[in-house]
Amino acid sequence: MSKFFITEYELVPGGTAYIVGDDARHIKKSLRVKKDDIIKVCDGKGNDYSARVEKLENDAVLVEVAERIDQNGEPKLKVNLFMAVTKGEGFEYAIQKCVEAGAASIQPLITEHTVISIAETKLDKRVERWNKISESAAKQSGRSAIPLVSYPLTMAEALKKPKGAEPSIICYVKEGTLGLKQLLTENPGADTLNVFIGPEGGFSPAEWEIAKRAGLQSVSLGKRILKAETAGFFVTLAAMYEYGELGVKD
Ligand code: SAM
């Protein structure tokens, strides 16, 4: 059953909602959905519902929301990525791939060795673009939540973000004391994993110091050095696989 995001309104069983834009055209022209057909809709916050098509208009499809569907595309494990912004298209690919792999959120980082600077005037547009990429990756991969890509923060600011008792790791090439596999197997019941990834030039000694003071566990990803934009995807995949969220039949 095809799934469509409706993020503009709250979805309530028994209520109605409009699907608009490209999705509405796709429903009418490509899928040839008819009145009273049942489709799946999703609020972008992790909730899927079945819905009955009530009316097909020119650029909109009116649906009546029915019951909530339990089975959705969201992993139980929440991987929150704190990733240094890299230049070029690499960071955009990283967002796309991490969302497909199941990441819960992405916090871009501006670190001391970050080589790209985003002008204040262009920041809103850039963050909007990152969130659009997250949204289309979420749609394409059948997710039920659209992972938020936040405004960039420095390491010091990001470390102030409240974190619970869940494992928080910093992928650090020089002083990786614990292998990622070991960390994951030692925390079998974890429902959240916060992961810090540095830029191409790595974290500075000062950033490493404040991360250590904030209690982040230094972790090695193995013998090979991954590009900054690959590392977040790699950790998300490994964690999802370890916790049975990847490569298993639904
Ligand atoms: N020369 C840099 C350094 O010494 O950190 C290499 C940086 S690497 C290209 C970019 C980021 O990816 C690193 O800051 C780290 O967060 C992560 N990373 C890549 N490969 C890693 C590995 N094998 N172990 C731990 N972290 C890794």
Image: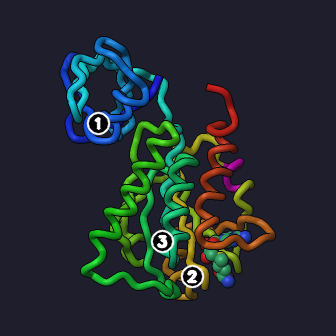
Q: Closer to the N terminus: mark 2 or mark 1?
A: 1
Q: Is mark 2 within 8 Å of ligand 1?
A: yes
Q: Is residue 75 magenta?
A: no
| Residue at 71%, 48% in the rendered image | 185
- Residue 164 in picture, x, y percent from top left: 43, 54
Question: Looking at the picture, does residue 167 appear above or below residue 142?
Answer: below
Q: Quadrant of residue 225?
A: bottom right
Seen in the picture, residue 218 relative to 181 is either above or below; the reply is below
Question: Which residue is denoted by mark 1 in the rendering?
Answer: 6
Left/right placement of residue 107 relative to residue 96 reads left
Tell me, yes or no, whether the two marked residues, 2 and 1, touch with CB atoms within 8 Å: no
Q: Quadrant of the C terminus?
A: top right
Q: Is residue 213 visible?
A: no
User: Residue at image x 46%, y 84%?
Assistant: 116
Q: Amino acid at mark 2?
A: Phe
- For label 2, the residue is 203
What amino acid does circle 1 point to?
Ile
Residue 200 is situated, as x and y percent measured from the top left of the image, at: 60, 80
Considering only vertical position in the picture, is 199 above or below 45? Answer: below
Task: Name the residue tied to disc 3.
Answer: 214
Region of the chain picked out in magenta, as a range: 182-186
Q: Nearer the viewer, mark 3 or mark 2?
A: 2
Q: Measure how far apart labels 3 and 2 are at the Cα level.
A: 15 Å
Q: CA distance from mark 1 to mark 3?
A: 38 Å
User: Disc 3 or 2, which lies upstream in sequence?
Assistant: 2
Q: Amino acid at mark 3?
A: Ala
Instruction: Say what secondary structure mark 3 lies in.
Output: loop
Circle 3 crowding by C-alpha within 10 Å: few under 14, some 14–19, many from 20 = few
